[in-house]
């Protein structure tokens, strides 16, 4: 369970660094870098905070991950959770922040 | 090379250590009610720090229509086999609905029916979108003028003298600076302790755990070292979770009515009982009997239910949704495998923490506790943490209003001998705490100085988790232990404490790692003493003592502890029945 930050996409705004509850992200040469990948809780706070969808969330191989990566893009109150599957398929689930969980 | 710390000195009316749910709500209450100056010291950033970083699935403690707060007390009491503080449960329960309404005002989305009534989930829960619970709360706190927020400041020591707190010392994670904060009252709201035991996923995903891995028991450790009384550490919490992702099971169980079944398709939950600990215990036993793996029976749910589950998990535990999509095995097609986690020490689900009076004041005068760090009040969950933050804030307001009155009276009698004595004693206190603060800062400098350590904090953490796992009832021993094992665990933790004193750090983040390890070791020491103190098995799995496998009514008591002259003393206290509780000894 951890994140990977796309260096090309990262705009160096630092919002992911601010919000990480473990202070695990640092800046190197103007770009965010995941400094302690093994210490990530998997809360996805940074994934949701990133304004350019540069942070990918993945499951470690030890918990069944096989290389799929999830990013978030925002459209007002709608969060688009984009899952890029390792087989090349894409799945997007939209969640409206104004709607409650049904369960 | 010795580091020269910059020392930042702050004087405030109220210091709140930890800006999670309870700490933030206490700050909000104080700032709405008073003009007091309030400082929050938070080791991360209040926007997403604490238990609610990813979100929360529901409001799990709410007084639904047709129920009263006492019903909640009765439920929690039964679930914990009587070892609860009814005064704490009742006062928290009386505020569940009011704090929920306040959060809705602040922007929390709560599901309502066509009549505008909250939609309930079972008897005590209501449905929400809890994804941005913490940012909503943090935003409200940030808008208050009299609250100063110190993000990335890690507090390591309480400044106390003669049983009264005067402030705290910590360090910045951003630069080489120490903070000495003097306060008239201090609220500790640092949460519970994770990472004591070897986790479910000890490798790359070691932090994919139920409880925030950044909650390292700092508040417990500081309190223990300052001589505060603690309660019920032996009532460990073990969560029943979705395998690997350690995502919640309640949403599935309550949301789509999924039962716990073993690999033979047998519904085993009725066989072992339905209390929180029995649900875990049943799963452990079924695995031991060769009937594993165990599952929540979701196969057969319809597409709409499936989609709702996928969305609900994105709002609190997105790894589970990713897992479903990644494997292509959606919950309608395949049951969800479940497992028990490693044990944690918390006051929000079970009852471990500071021994407080009804006002949430600890046994140290002026030091209050709220949320997971406060003991005696299990199943308080999020609304209970908010309620305790509010209750502690109100008590602090009353204490400081009382102090102000006394000091005005003193000012009116400046010629009075007793007031001269008071001035000289306050100078003595100032000097004493200055020395304590200086010693703590010197300790930071020593850890950061250029010296060799045989081990790293990470290596000692692994060693600690192995000891706790094997000798103090971790996953690998099915949460069971005996007296001989506990004795060994205690000796081995002592060895690790000695090694931890030699640790070195190269930067402020490594300094944090050193302190987090020490906090955990101190909590382990107390936990082992508590497990040894309860010579019975009161809650299966949570405290499963193989030398004393039955419940013993002689232990229908609280197991409390206090550090006296460097030694942990166990105190068995009678159950507090009703009414309010004040510290007497």
Image (cartoon, coloured by chain):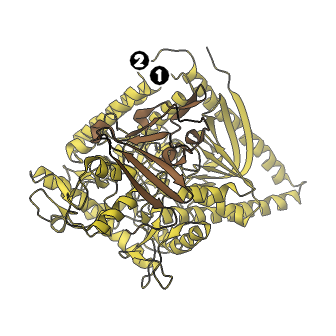
* Closer-to-camera residue (B198/B84): B198
Q: Earlier in the sequence, mark 2 or mark 1?
A: 2
User: What colour denotes chain A?
Assistant: brown
- Say which element carries label 1: loop
Q: Residue at x 57, y 61 (%)?
A: B389
Q: Residue at x 27, y 65 (%)?
A: B553
Could you say which quadrant of the image residue B282 lies in? bottom left
Looking at the image, how many numbered discs can be counted on the residues?
2
**The numbered mark 1 sits on a residue in which chain?**
B
Depicted B112 relative to depicted A66: above or below: below
Q: Residue at x 46, y 32 (%)?
A: A36
Q: What residue did someone put label 2 on?
A: B454
Contact, mark 2 vs mark 1 (Cβ under 8 Å)? yes
Could you say which quadrant of the image residue B199 lies in? top left
Q: Where's residue B248, x and y in %?
A: 34, 57
Q: What residue did someone put label 1 on?
A: B502
Q: Quadrant of the N terminus of chain B?
A: top right
- Check disc 1: other Cα within 10 Å, few if <14, some if 14-19, many if 20+: some
What chain is colored yellow?
Answer: B
Q: Where's residue B236, x and y in %?
A: 34, 52
- Say which element carries label 2: loop
Q: Is residue B163 left or right of residue B572?
A: right
Depicted B183 relative to depicted B126: above or below: above
């Amino acid at each position: 369970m951890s994140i990977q930050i796309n260096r090309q996409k990262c705009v160096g705004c630092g919002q992911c660094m601010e919000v990480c509850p473990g202070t695990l992200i640092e800046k190197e040469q103007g770009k965010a870098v995941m400094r302690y990948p093994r210490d990530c809780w998997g809360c996805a706070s940074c994934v949701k905070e990133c304004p350019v969808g540069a942070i990918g969330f993945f499951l470690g191989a030890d918990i069944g991950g096989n290389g799929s990566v999830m990013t978030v893009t925002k459209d007002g109150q709608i969060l688009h959770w984009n899952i890029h599957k390792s087989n090349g398929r894409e799945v997007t689930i939209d969640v409206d922040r104004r709607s409650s969980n049904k369960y | 090379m010795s580091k020269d710390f910059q020392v930042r000195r702050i004087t405030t009316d109220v210091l709140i250590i930890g800006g999670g749910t309870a700490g933030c709500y206490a700050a909000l209450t104080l700032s709405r009610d008073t003009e007091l100056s309030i400082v929050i010291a938070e080791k991360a950033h209040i926007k997403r720090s604490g238990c609610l970083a990813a979100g929360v699935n529901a409001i799990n403690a709410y007084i639904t229509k047709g129920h009263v707060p006492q019903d909640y007390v009765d439920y929690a009491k039964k679930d914990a086999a009587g070892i609860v503080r009814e005064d704490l449960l009742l006062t928290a329960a009386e505020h569940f609905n009011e704090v929920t309404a306040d959060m809705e005002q602040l922007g929390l989305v709560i599901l309502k029916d066509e009549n505008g009534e909250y939609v309930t989930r079972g008897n005590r829960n209501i449905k929400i979108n809890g994804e941005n619970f913490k940012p909503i709360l943090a935003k409200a706190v940030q808008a208050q003028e009299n609250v100063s927020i110190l993000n990335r400041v890690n507090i390591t020591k309480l400044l106390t003298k003669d049983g009264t707190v005067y402030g705290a010392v910590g360090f910045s994670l951003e630069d080489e600076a120490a903070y000495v904060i003097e306060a008239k009252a201090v609220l500790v709201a640092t949460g519970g302790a994770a990472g004591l035991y070897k986790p479910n996923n000890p490798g790359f995903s070691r932090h994919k755990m139920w409880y925030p891995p950044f909650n390292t028991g700092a508040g417990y450790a500081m309190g223990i070292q300052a001589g505060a009384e603690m309660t019920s550490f032996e009532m460990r919490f073990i969560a029943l979770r979705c395998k690997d992702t350690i995502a919640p099971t309640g949403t599935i169980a309550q949301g789509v009515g999924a039962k716990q079944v073993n690999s033979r398709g047998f519904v085993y939950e009725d066989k072992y009982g339905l209390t929180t600990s029995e649900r875990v215990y049943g799963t452990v036993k079924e695995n031991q009997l060769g009937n594993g793996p165990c599952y929540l029976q979701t196969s057969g749910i319809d597409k709409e239910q499936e989609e709702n589950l996928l969305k609900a998990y994105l709002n609190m535990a997105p790894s589970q949704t990713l897992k479903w999509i990644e494997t292509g095995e959606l919950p309608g097609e395949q049951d969800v495998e479940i497992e028990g986690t490693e044990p944690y020490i918390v006051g929000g689900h079970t009852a471990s923490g500071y021994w407080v009076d009804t006002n949430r004041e600890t046994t140290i005068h002026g030091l209050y506790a709220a949320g997971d760090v406060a003991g005696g009040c299990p199943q308080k969950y999020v609304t209970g943490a908010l309620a305790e933050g509010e209750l502690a804030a109100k008590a602090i307001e009353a204490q400081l209003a009382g102090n102000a009155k006394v000091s005005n009276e003193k000012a009116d009698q400046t010629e009075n001998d007793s007031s001269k004595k008071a001035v000289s004693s306050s100078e003595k206190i100032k000097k004493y705490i200055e020395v304590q603060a200086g010693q703590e800062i010197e300790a930071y400098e020593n850890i950061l100085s250029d010296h060799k350590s045989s081990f790293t904090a990470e290596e000692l953490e692994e060693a600690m988790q192995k000891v706790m796992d094997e000798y103090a009832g971790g996953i690998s021993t099915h949460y069971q232990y005996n007296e001989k094992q506990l004795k060994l665990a205690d000796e081995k933790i002592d060895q690790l404490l000695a090694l931890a004193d030699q640790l070195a750090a190269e930067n402020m983040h490594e300094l944090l790692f050193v302190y987090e390890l020490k906090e955990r070791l101190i909590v382990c020491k107390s936990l082992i003493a508590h497990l040894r103190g309860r010579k019975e098995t009161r809650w299966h799995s949570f405290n499963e003592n193989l030398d004393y496998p039955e419940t013993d009514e002689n232990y229908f008591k609280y197991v409390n502890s206090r550090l006296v002259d460097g030694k942990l003393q166990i105190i068995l206290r009678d159950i507090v029945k009703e009414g309010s509780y004040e510290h007497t000894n």
